[in-house]
Amino acid sequence: MIAAKGDLMPGKIATAALVAGLAGAVAAGDEGPVPEPEPIGTMSELMIKLMYPASDAILYVESRAPANEVEWNELQAQALILAESANLIMMPSRVVGDRDEWMRDARLMFDAGAAAYEAALEQDLDALIALNEQVYMSCVVCHRRTRPDYGRNYKRFDDPPAEALPAAEEAPPAEEGRLP
C-alpha cells in the first residue's frame, strides 16, 4: 500500500523503531568486560621514544627557540607528549614501587608538561624557560626514587657521602696536565 502524500509519519516511526531495534541488538551483543588500557611499549621505550625527546624540547628551548609557526607547532606537540606521557605511566600496570609515590611523581611530570603545553600554545618563550626547573625536577624526583644509581656521577646532584670518597692521604697525586 502506498501512503498518501501527507501520510509519511507512520513510515518515519517504523524506520526510527527499526534503527533503535538494531542499535539495541548491537549493544546487547556487546556485554563483554569493559576494556582496560593495555600497554604496548615498555617503560624504557616510553622514556627513550617519548619522554626524553619531549622533555629535551622544553629543557633546551632557550637555545632552540622556535622561530616560526611550524616550529611552535612542533614544540606544542612535544609539550603535549610530555604531559600525556605522565598519563601513560599512571596506568596500573606501569606503577613501579609504592603506588602513591609513583602517582605523585607522575603528577609532577603531568603538571610540568601541561604548563609547558599552555605556554607553547601562547608562544610564550619566557614562560617555557621558567618551566625548565619544574620539568627537570619532575624527572629527578622520580628517577631518584626508582633508579638506585641515578645521578651518582653527576655534579649537579648532592655530593657523595664522605665515606664514599678516598681519604686525602690515600688519593694518588694528580699528574700534571691530566684531570683526576
Image (cartoon, grey):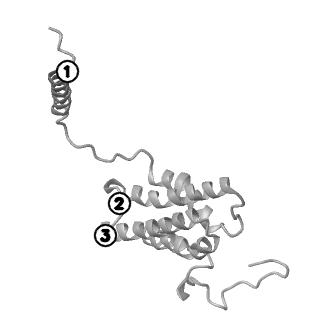
> What is the three-letter code of the residue carrying label 1?
Gly
**Quarter location, residue 172:** bottom right
Element type at mark 1: loop
Q: Which amino acid is tagged 2? A: Val
State the CA–CA distance, disc 1 to disc 3. Answer: 66 Å
Nearer-N-terminus badge (1/2):
1
Q: Could you say where residue 93 lies in the image, as x and y percent from the top left?
A: 33, 53
Quadrant into which the C terminus falls: bottom right
| Disc 2 to disc 3, C-alpha distance | 9 Å
* Depicted 2 relative to depicted 10: above or below: above
Q: Real-space Cα distance between discs 1 and 2?
A: 64 Å
Secondary structure of the residue carrying numbered label 3: helix
Q: Position of residue 158 (x, y in %)?
A: 55, 83
SS for callout 2 = loop
Q: Nearer the viewer, residue 32 or 143?
A: 32
Q: Earlier in the sequence, mark 1 or mark 3?
A: 1
Q: Residues within 10 Å of mark 2 (few under 14, many from 20)?
A: some
Report the residue marked by disc 3.
100
- Disc 3 marks a residue whose amino acid type is Asp
Q: Residues within 10 Å of mark 1 (few under 14, many from 20)?
A: few
Vertical position of residue 143 compared to residue 1: above or below: below
Quadrant in the picture for residue 95: bottom left
x%, y% of residue 108? 44, 71
For the N terminus, which image quadrant? top left
Q: Earlier in the sequence, mark 2 or mark 3?
A: 2
Residue at x 63% of width, y 74% of height = 126
Q: Which mark is residue 6?
A: 1
Residue matched to label 2: 95
